[in-house]
Amino acid sequence: MHPALVFVAAVCVIIAVLLLFSAFQGASYYGVTPQAQIGLAIITLVVAAIAIWMIYKAARAKLSKIKTGKEALIGSVGVAVTDLKPKGEIRVLGEFWQATAKDEWIKDGEKVEVVGMDGMLLIVRPVKEKA
């Protein structure tokens, strides 16, 4: 999160609270009417809400799981496009990859799970169907 964005949100909330408090007490700053103070308070609250929303989105993006590269491939499930005896081709995450079967040969159309990578070659094993 960007500290400046947190600072802007906090300052906007403080200014809005002070404007609302003074407007309801009947005080006026620099000759501004209480109605105008309420309007300014609403505007600053909207700016604070936008800043808080941006902070939320940034935090969510920072904490989200990596969705590309080796980290995304390992553990994902795909389908064998050719027989893997032990090498062949699979389709995983919408892409075709060269793969090698880890333990046993895999038939065309069988589901596979990626368990590792050796350069650009995926290491796969057949997915065991749950009963």
Image (cartoon, helix red, strand yellow):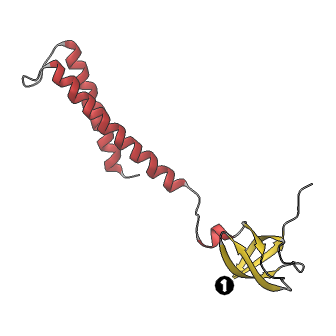
Residue occupying image coordinates x 22% and y 26%: 39
**Residue 81: percent from left, percent from top:** 77, 78
- Is 51 above or below relative to 120? above
Q: Check the image and name the residue furthest to the top.
A: 25
Q: Is residue 45 above or below residue 50?
A: above
Specify the quadrant of the image occupied by residue 74: bottom right
Q: Is residue 76 above or below residue 12?
A: below
Q: Which residue is at 20% across, 19% downward?
A: 22
Callout 1, which amino acid?
Gly
Residue 112: percent from left, percent from top: 80, 71
The residue under label 1 is 119
Q: Residue at x 29, y 43 (%)?
A: 8
Q: Position of residue 33 (x, y in %)?
A: 12, 20
In the picture, measured across the screen, residue 94 lies left or right of residue 5, that is: right
| Neighbours of disc 1 within 10 Å: few (<14), some (14-19), many (20+) | few
Quadrant location, the C terminus: bottom right
Is 38 on the left or on the right of 45, as rendered?
left
Residue at image x 35%, y 41%? 50
**Quadrant in the picture for residue 53:** top left
Under circle 1, the secondary element is: loop
Does residue 93 sit above or below 89 in this rendering? above
